Each structure stands twice: as structure tokens, then as C-alpha cells.
Amino acid sequence: MNALFNFDSLTPDFMWYALASIGVRAESGFLALNSYENRVYQFVDEEKKRYVVKFYRPQRWSEQQIQEEHEFTLSLLEHEIPIAPPVIINGKTLHHHEGYLFTLFDSVGGRQFEVDNYDQLEMVGRFMGRIHKVSEGLPTFKHRPTMGLEEYLYQSRDILKQSQFIPTYIESAFFQDMQLLIKAIEEQWQSDYTPIRLHGDCHPGNILWRDGPMFVDLDDARNGPAIQDLWMLLNGDRHEKLIQLDIVLEGYQEFCDFDVNQLKLIEPLRGLRLIHYMSWLAKRWQDPAFPVAFPWFNDAKYWEGQVLAIKEQLAALQEPPLSLTPSW
């Protein structure tokens, strides 16, 4: 789909007929949920059951790639991992309607995961260990990509260079600093880890809390280092991150061994995410939902802040990697 693609044709009538085509009749209106890459809506059917329907952005993932995500999610469910699975209808989880791919999910409620609650953090670490233990018993994804510098750094840099967002007066400094950051990441990037299937985007917003964690949204599932699913749980200053890391891994290692050498990847991965996020917004800007949701992205103050963020990440890469306490 070209850059001008948007979801204008995804009207309530369209969605109703798409669901009707698989035997599901929506009775309520469609409540839009917080999703921009795809379009996700909650509704109630005629039997008063609450569902979530997800319409995939065309030409982002292939059918094979989406199917791999679904099969992985169902494998986790078989191992009693608390995760939101796709609903199987007529033996399928992925459906078609007039050019769109869509999937139905049971609606799962929950509170916000409290990142500063150490009991919750330990339980999340425990379940991440269980997820990765399942991953270790499966082959890596065949169709989904493996995390690497090409997609996250080099393609992202090219997208930003071709965009018109960076103000002229800081453009030179921005790209000079970005290149320094890329070089620092290249120097510290390690590819000698054993890749496994990942959630891929396990930030606190993708974890709901009920009696324990409920993991949602595997849309970014891919192969990569185990630490990718753990580092986004760490926040605050270095001391706070060390405490959180100990707690996460205390739970994690009850179920899955952890390669401590991967701790060296935390700051490179943080740098990858910093650059990739900017390029993602630039790439999707012509989708009308993005200027509404992220108006600050086209403001000079945002880009001044990003110059500072790049410098701060460069400094973080010069510090010693996080390490476990001697008790480990």
C-alpha cells in the first residue's frame, strides 16, 4: 500500500458486514481502542458477548507472518500463559473482507500494570520466563523478521533523512549526533546470542493486570534476544533499574535460564527504539490518525528534545552495562 493509504473505508457498516461474513453480528457500536498501526475496536455481539476486532494495516505483515503470530499465541495459551488469543472461527483465526485482513479476540479487561509495584514486577518476570521457555522449545519464526540494525537503524535513518520534519536550523546537528549514536550502537551490538521468538513490544502498556499479568498485542512479535522482552520493564535512574532487573530476573529464572551477556544489549536496544520510533511516526504521518494523536511530532520543540535525547542515549552507551548483584 502506498504512503497515502488510510483507513477511511473502514466505516461501521463495513466492519459490521466483515464480522457478519464470519457469522458474528455486532449489536453495539464500535469503540475505537488505542491502536494506530492497525485499527482495533471493541463491540458487543447479539449474544451480549464482548469482543475486540483488529483490522490489519494492508501490506505491513503478510498473511504468513500474521499466521505465525497467531500460532505462537495459541502455543502460549496451551501452556497456560495468560495471553489474549485470537478466536478460532471455522478453523481459522485470520479472515478476509474486501481487501482487509482481520481477526477477532475475546475482550479482556484489567487494570494498568504498576511498574513500580515490585510484587507485580516479579510476577511479570516469572511469566516472561515461562513465555521464553515455550519459545526455546519452538523453532524461530520462519516468516517474521529477526531484530537487527538494518531495519531499526539504517532504514529508520533513511526515512528520517527523506522526511521534511527536522527543522533546518538543527538538521545538521541532529543527523551528526544520530550518526554518532548509530556508530556507538554498532560497536556494542552483539549477534552471538541465540535468537528466540519474542513478544517484541513488551512495554507496560501491553500488560494488563487482573489476578496477575495478562499479555496483549503480539503484533510486533519477531525473533531476537530474550532481553528485548525485559528491558522495557526497567525505568528510572541506574540504581532503580538495577533493583528492578534483580526482581524481574528472580522471577524469570524460576522457569528459564538467562544469558547475562545479553545485559550488554540493553542500551543498544534502547537506542534502536529511539531512532525507530521517530521513523515510524514519519513513515505513517500521512495516515490522518497520526497528526491527531501525535501533534507534537511536527513541532520544532519536539526535535530539539530529540537532539537532547540522542545525546543522553550516547552518554548511556558510554556507561558500564547493567549487571546483576553479587547474590546472583
Image (cartoon, helix red, strand yellow):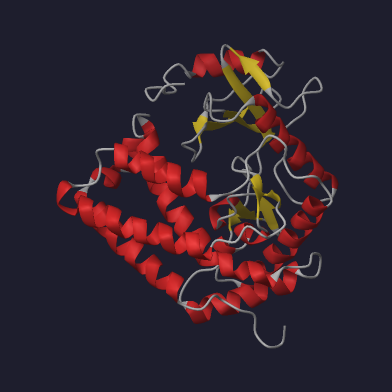
Instruction: Give the image quarter of residue 97.
Output: top right
Asked whether residue 48 appears in the rendered view, the answer is no
Residue 223 to residue 47: above or below: below
77 or 136: nearer the eye? 136
Of the 4 image quadrants, the one containing the C terminus is bottom right
Residue 176 place in picture, x, y as percent: 28, 57
Q: Is residue 56 left or right of residue 213?
A: left
Residue 298 to residue 122: above or below: above
**Tally of numbered tags:** 0
Q: Is residue 239 left or right of residue 174?
A: right
Residue 35 place in picture, x, y as percent: 49, 38
Residue 181 place in picture, x, y as percent: 39, 61
232 or 265: nearer the eye? 265
283 or 302: nearer the eye? 283
Residue 253 to residue 35: above or below: below
Residue occupying the point 77% across, 51% down = 135
Q: Is residue 160 left or right of residue 218?
A: left
Residue occupying the point 66% across, 32% down = 65
Instruction: Give the image quarter of residue 245.
Output: bottom right
Asked whether residue 208 appears in the rendered view, the answer is yes
Residue occupying the point 28% across, 59% down = 307
Residue 224 place in picture, x, y as percent: 65, 52
Q: Residue furthest bottom?
A: 326
